[in-house]
Each structure stands twice: as C-alpha cells, then as structure tokens.
Amino acid sequence: MPLRGLAKAKNFTLGPTAPMKTFTENIHIQTKESNNFRNSGKSHKLTNNIQNENLFRYESKIKSDFDEIVPTLKEIARIQHHEDFINKAQKISRKNLGIDLPLHVLDKSWVKPLDMRALYAWCAFKQHEKLSDNFFNNDPLEGAAGSRDAEDFEKFLLDCGIHLLDITPCSDGRLAHSVAYVMRIPFSSVRRRSHAGALFDIENTVNRWVKTEHKRYRENVPNEAHKDTRYLKVVTYHFSSVDPLHQGCAAHGSNDELAAAEGRNKLYAFKEAVENSFCCGASVDLMLIGLDTDTDSLKIHLSTSDGGIDLEKTISTLEIYNSTINFSKEDAEREICQTISKQSSKDKLSGLEKFTYKLIVNNISQIDYVKSFHNGSYEDIGHAERFIGVGIGFKEVHLRNLTYFAHLDTVEEGAPDLDVGVKIFTGLNVSQDLPIPVVIRFDYSGKVPGAKERVCYILALLLEIGTTFIPPKLLECL
C-alpha cells in the first residue's frame, strides 16, 4: 500500500483534492472578473427557479443543523455548574439542534468538566441520523426510486440509448452534490461511487457492468438485452476558477490537465476491459466532465473523430449561460442544440447528444443557484466538510462540503483515502481540539444469507485498524 502513510508524510501538505477551508476576499474579487456573469441581477430563461428555492431551503437547513453544534455546546459549557444543569442543557439542545444529549455524559458534569469532545461527536452523529431519516422517509430531493422525476428520467435515459448511468466524481466534499444539484439528476437513477481523484476501480466497475447486463438478460430490467442501448460511464474531475494552482484536485497536484487525462485513461481502460473480456460486440459509452467547484459550471469533453475523448475541446456551460442570458427560452434551446450538434431543435438530437443537452440545461439552473444564493462563487473555496463518510452507500449525502467520502470495499484498499480524510480534518477539527467524526456505513442485501454478519465483521476490523493509525482521542466513530 504505497499511499498508506500519505497523511503523515512531511512533504504532503494538501488533502486529496484541496487545502483546508479558505475564505479569501482578494481572490473572490478576481473571480468575479474572470467568471464575468452577464446581467448579474437576472436569471436565465431556462432556469428552474422554483426548484432552486427548494434546494436552497434543504441545503440551508441541513448545514445549519451541523454548524449550530459548536455555538450550542459553548452555551451549554457556560452553565455546567448551574443548578438543574441537565434539564437546562437538554432544553438548549432541543431548541437549537433538535436532539437530546447523552445522559451518561451530562451526569458526570458535577464530578469533572464536561466531555465536550464526546458531546460534539454525539451531536454530529445525531445530525447525520436526522439527515438520513428525513432523506429516506420524506424524499426531500424528490429523487427516490418510483418517484415521478426518477421514472421520467429513466425513460429519458432509455430514449438516449442508455440503460445504466454510472458516475464517479472525486471523493472531495465539494463534489458530493454533483448528481442532485449540479447535474439535477434524480439520485436513484444513477450509480454513484466517489473515489479520490475520480480514479475508480476498474474491476469493480466491470463487475457492475456484468451484473447490469445479466439483469437485462434474466429480467428485462431496465430493458431487454437485445435493445440497442449502452452502459454509460462518466468520470467527473474538478478544477477551480478561483485559485487554479492550489484549489484544484490535489490528488493530481491541482493540475487540471492531468486530472482530465487520468480520468480519460480510467475510462479507456474500463472500455478495453469490457471489450477484451466479452464477445458479441460488448462495449460501453464514455463521458468525461470537468466541474468548477467554485461556480458549479461544467466543461463537457467532446468526442474525437475516432470516437475517443478530446482533452482540449469542451463545451463550457458557463460560456453558454453568459452567451444566452438575454435569449428567449426557445432561442437559448436552439443555441445549445447548435453548439452540441449543429441541429436547430432538441427534438432532432439523439443518443449522447440528447443526454448532453439535458446536462447543459440542468446545469444552467445550478449556475443560477450559485449566482443567486452564493454571489456567483462559493465562499468556502477549500475543504469545509462536517464529517468523514467511510464505506459504501451514503445515498443520503447530496450536499456540497458536507462529507468527505472514503470509499471502501476492504480495509486495505480504503485505508489511503481514509488517511487523507484524517489529514483534512486535522486542519478542520483537530486544530480546534475537536474530534474527527467518522460515520462508517455499509449497505447489504437482506436476501443474502450471512451478509449482515460479514458487514459487521468489516466494521469491527475498521474500528480496530482505524485506532492504530488515528489516535483514539482524535477519532469518534458511529
């Protein structure tokens, strides 16, 4: 494991994707000049403003629940020697955070100072629990399986000749919202697996392709095997328009060209693996997308004449936004179509061109989202995650800078990502004498005998091994 000691290396000063949370006034002045939004006071005709309002309410509520933890605990710390402390502390916590604090911690306040680190971790875990319960019970993003939006999008994918959409964004928390917000895709209609540097595991993805094709043959889901549709694999790397030399993907040294090239190499290797391993013309479609983590605009890489991915030629959604901001809805749609394929109508588009059109239109809404609610560019241009998510799953996390993902199938292969997550939170939390909240999550099938026991065994290994390279006083796991 060559990257095992990455977090402790003296010459490694950046996280896997960016430095710590950064607020730089001068940089943002430059950003406004470089991004140069036209008609900054108006929204685009293709923008879904109602959806933007709903998404902002959701983002604001969830993040405020986490960000209120420290002020609330400071308020409670000031009264720990007051009469009837426990009831007063619980009242404050319920009012500010909507949760109860653990009695076994509060009960000891008369003997010794409150264990504020334990309370902080408890609050972080409880807020994640609230987030998860709300997500799965109420579908706040309206993208659950069986929802109208999900069913409509899945039909749309089939119309584009796509029977499964598989997206790998970087594990950086600034890309955690790339599906539900940036691309406006119902979360249940896509397979999302985040990896540091967007460098996905080829064997795992081939196995997913096999499972998908097998289901088509055996169950005709999502469509019959003889239908002329493809598995679409998308890699989303990222870059920064605010501070490109420091705030890009540090897994690639903030080198945007390298990030794109490595993403393309992974895509090519996946396609070659499928074609070499299976007969009858088995293949896949590929797409490479760059995400500006400051504006949420996209750069969609075009295809070369031989069907490859062009690293130089891209479609910039921000440029389209600016060039069509004063257009009518119909004229803007026509301009996008002509940019993609020289067609004058979206009804004439097909295949990946039709899918690309949808991505561009959806992303225009997200550009306006950042423009309206974050002044065109996010204030936190670096890391500002609230907890580390380790394992497989986390379908409930679709908010920017909420979670750093450490994707993990086995302890050995997941340890390097976790190392770097600890490096990030050493700056975010440990520097303030706060613990590192780590939520360990694995999905398993209840239909498979022994699946739960095997997952519990992995969890036990994680806790045991995790404390060997993370000092226990810094680590809190759920």
Image (tube, grey):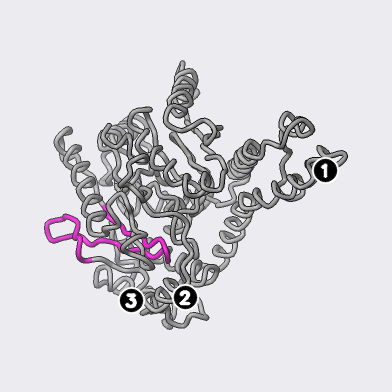
Whole-percent x, y for residue 453 in the image: 48, 18
The amino acid pointed to by label 2 is His
- Specify whether 156 is left or right of 245: right
Residue 88: mark in rendering? 1
The mark nearer the N terminus, 2 or 1, is: 2
Which type of secondary structure does the marked residue at label 1 adopt? helix
Alpha carbon separation for disc pair 2 and 1: 49 Å
On-image quarter of the N terminus: top left
In the rendered structure, which amino acid carries the disc numbered 1? Answer: Lys
* Separation (CA) of disc 3 from disc 2: 14 Å
Judge depth for marks 1 and 3 and give the one in front. 1
Q: Which residue is disc 3 drawn over? A: 335
Q: Nearer the viewer, mark 2 or mark 1?
A: 1
Q: Which mark is residue 44?
A: 2
Q: Is residue 358 visible?
A: no
Q: Main secondary structure of the magenta part?
A: strand
Q: Between label 3 and label 2, give the one nearer the viewer.
A: 2
Question: Disc 1 or 3, which lies upstream in sequence?
Answer: 1
The relative height of residue 280 versus residue 382 in the rendered view (above or below) is above
Q: Which residues are magenta?
A: 287-313
In this view, the residue in front, 66 or 60, is 66
Using the image as rendered, state which of residue 80 and residue 265 is in the foreground: 80
Is residue 61 among the parts visible in the rendering? yes
Residue kind at label 3, given as amino acid type: Glu
